[in-house]
Amino acid sequence: MYDVNDLPSLPVYEWDRAKKRAFLDAELSALTDWHAARCPEYARMRDAWPARGEGFEALPFLPVRLFKELTLKSVPDEALHRTMTSSGTTGQQVSRIYLDRETSALQSKVLSRIIGEFLGKQRLPMIILDTSAVIKNRAMFSARGAGILGFSMFARDKVFALDENMALDREGLEAFLEKHGGEDIFLFGFTFMIWQHFVARLRETGYHPDLSRGVLVHGGGWKKLADQQISTERFKRELRETCGLTRVHNYYGMVEQTGTIYMECEHGHLHAPVWSDVTIRRPGDFSVADVGETGLIQVSSVLPRSYPGHVLLTEDEGRILGEDDCPCGRKGKYFEILGRVKRAEVRGCSDTYEQK
Amino acid sequence: MTNLEKYVKAFSEALEVPESDVPALKYGESDQWDSVGHMTLIAALEDAFDIMVDMDDIIDLSSFEKGKEILRKYDVEI
């Protein structure tokens, strides 16, 4: 396995298929042994796993919901640094992801490398397109708050666009933009919040700040926007019209694999960075789908060491658009998300577990 | 004020802990020095010494002692 200190310095989007697969095969297979030796629940599932496919795609993929049902960790309690939780959209139980210092720092470093590819190395002034209330109450710390804080590392001066009552903080924004006139600005927010609160307020109030020097990174899923029939094109068009923002990058990521996010390039494609990959599986038999074929998204990441979450089957559907040949020049697979599986019944591993 | 005094004061004010408790602090081991506190602390250190800390150093600044080592890279001797 790679030394954790060397992992973050790998080139983010340079390795071609052959080189990346060799790396992932070796690294993910070593991680599988690592977790099997430290997490008895994982070892049971691994042992019962019918190996199919090749290389890292033959490794056991755990359904993400398993982290809601089981305590899966590969470090002793005293090494735990923090536990990340997410409820997902269906509610009920929350996922619990156990982080030690090492994995936590690795996640932050890798995230900073990926974001650096889009923002540059400098820490920029940052506008958070959300309410300041989201990080005020530490006891009620949500995934939203954690996301905002994680991304705040890339900033050196920050302002929230919305006040605690979700109203536009126009005065605050004006002062901030005046202070940082002529500088590039990093904007971050969650897709739905941006649409529902920021863009809507700009339209209502007629206040059109000049954010043409901004780079927006947004994530959190399209589900709510898709329900309202809002397309990516419309989202981008409204941002351009209300505040002149043209550099807009969506990202796909999940709390179960924090750090290795998939960023949208200038051509609208989501890209796998060197540390992670997407595999599309056919819902019927979980075999690996072809390029262009829609199926369930498996995400693999070489970062998780404190919990066995290096190979996961999500409840999202998507398809691979290509590999190594995106017009943006980035190597690796690029893909698109097509939504969430209607009534996700992704079992397999948890069935295996119950047989123990 | 000496650099050490400024350094301790930044920790104490950013993390809202008495100055006497500051030298033993480690990231994640107290309620105050969580991820929110961490960004407040970085901002306080940047203001106090008029520096801009790189992202990697922000991530690595995990204790009171480690912070001194990191600030040395920015020509701040504590």
Image (tube, coloured by chain):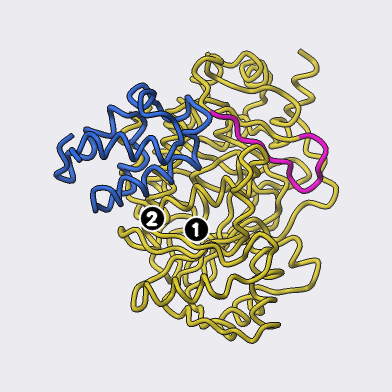
Chain colours: A yellow, B blue
Q: Chain of mark 2?
A: A
Residue under the point 33% across and 36% down: B60
State the quadrant of the C terminus of chain A: top right
Q: Is residue A354 above or below residue A336?
A: above
The three-letter amino acid code for the residue at tag 2 is Tyr
Residue under the point 45% across and 74% down: A175
Q: Which residue is mark 1?
A: A271
SS under mark 2: loop
Q: Which mark is residue A16?
A: none
Q: Measure the alpha-carbon separation of dots 1 and 2.
A: 8 Å
- The answer to whether residue A194 is seen in the rendering is yes
Q: Are marks 1 and 2 in contact (CB under 8 Å)?
A: yes
Residue under the point 64% across and 67% down: A194
Decide if residue A289 is on the left or right side of residue B78: right
State the quadrant of the N terminus of chain A: top left
Image-quadrant location for residue A27:
top left
Q: Which residue is mark 2?
A: A13
Residue under the point 50% across and 59% down: A263
Q: Residue B39 in the image: x percent, y percent?
A: 43, 45
Image-quadrant location for residue A349:
top right
Q: Residue A60 in the image: x percent, y percent?
A: 62, 29
The three-letter amino acid code for the residue at tag 1 is His
SS under mark 1: strand
- The answer to whether residue A21 is seen in the rendering is no
Stretch of the chain drawn in magenta = A82-93
Q: Residue furthest right?
A: A343
Would you say residue A91 sits in the magenta stretch? yes
From the viewer's side, name the closer residue of A274 and A24: A274
Label 1: few (<14), some (14–19) or many (≥20) C-alpha neighbours in 10 Å: many
Q: Residue B55 in the image: x percent, y percent?
A: 34, 48
